[in-house]
Amino acid sequence: MRLIGVEAGGTKFVCVLGNASGEIQDRLEVPTEVPEITLEKIIGFVRKHNEIEPIQAIGIGSFGPIDPIHSSSTYGYITSTPKLAWHNCNIVGAFQEHFKVPIGFDTDVNAAALGEHYWGSGVNCRHLIYLTVGTGIGGGVIMNGQLQHGMMHAEMGHLFIPHDRAKDPFAGACPFHKDCLEGLAAGPAIKERWGVESALELPPNHIAWEIESDYLAYAMANYILCFSPERIILGGGVMKQKHLLPMIQTKTREFLAGYIQNYSVSHINDTIVLAALGQEAGNVGALALAKQAITCI
Ligand SMILES: [Zn+2]
């Protein structure tokens, strides 16, 4: 099977040719300029591979907000993004003009969630959550093997969590809510709170990680209470700090306080795990959207 995955990011687009096992055979990386320039380069790459041997499906995992609802008149659009050139861009339509194959379309984090479900840390899990903790915090929910949407897509990074201002006087960095989860725990918040260029400058025993793991564990507890997932998969640059995961696991169990039996000591370490796809989560996730587009026909 020949599949195309398009990872549409705010600073770059990555387009890959791959197969139904999530293996990548060729790739193109281009900067995110105006749609006419960037999409022409990506479509040229897809056309080249389609002429060698026909492709079967395309998956697009995009920065948001987007409209992923099939019945909507703006399905397939990047909608109210602050990147003005991409505002109301019909990205799915641009590919449909050139290629008569099924096209899967969702957010970049939902794409990564599906990629982890097919080929990463969520294999054989029917109910899982994927959360990326990096320059922002975003998540995707899969229940009964299906990505979940409401009127649009979830914004799980902007969760409201306890903020003890005596312990952490930092006001928060979210331009909309100040001290939501993303405003307190994403990479930019860590840098701003501690005045560092990179979180790597903070040693494992720094109080920064105590505070960071508090916030992420509150989020874990809330997601568990809302969705009862078998697994929560954590990715993104902040999670590269190896000491962070065990702190989050321990605190999540403490915060749940024995209320939900399945998330006891023995289970919590199997429930909250690290992502397996790493840097490739975005483009392998887009391949997963392409694979799903075929199986949904
Ligand atoms: Zn927010």
Image: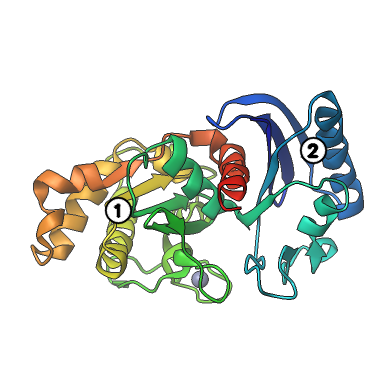
Q: Is residue 13 left or right of residue 196?
A: right
In contact (CB < 8 Å): disc 2 and disc 1: no
Using a 10 Å C-alpha cutoff, classify the residue at mark 1 as few (fewer than 14 neighbours), some (14 to 19) or many (20 or more): many
Residue type, label 2: Val
- In the rendered image, residue 97, in percent from the top left (x then y), is placed at 88, 53
Q: Which residue in the protein does label 2 denote?
A: 30
Answer whether residue 189 is visible to the viewer in this image. no
Residue type, label 1: Ser
Image vertical order of residue 268 relative to residue 51, above or below:
below
Which mark lies nearer to you, 2 or 1? 2
Q: CA distance from mark 2 to mark 1?
A: 35 Å
Q: Is residue 292 left or right of residue 90?
A: left
- In the rendered image, residue 191, in percent from the top left (x then y), is placed at 50, 52
**Cβ(mark 2) to ligand 1 < 8 Å?**
no
- In the rendered image, residue 188, in percent from the top left (x then y), is placed at 53, 55
Image vertical order of residue 157 relative to residue 282, above or below:
below
Using a 10 Å C-alpha cutoff, classify the residue at mark 2 as few (fewer than 14 neighbours), some (14 to 19) or many (20 or more): some
Q: Which residue in the protein does label 1 denote?
A: 213
Q: Which mark is residue 198?
A: none
- In the rendered image, residue 203, in percent from the top left (x then y), is placed at 34, 37
**Residue at image x 56%, y 34%?**
280
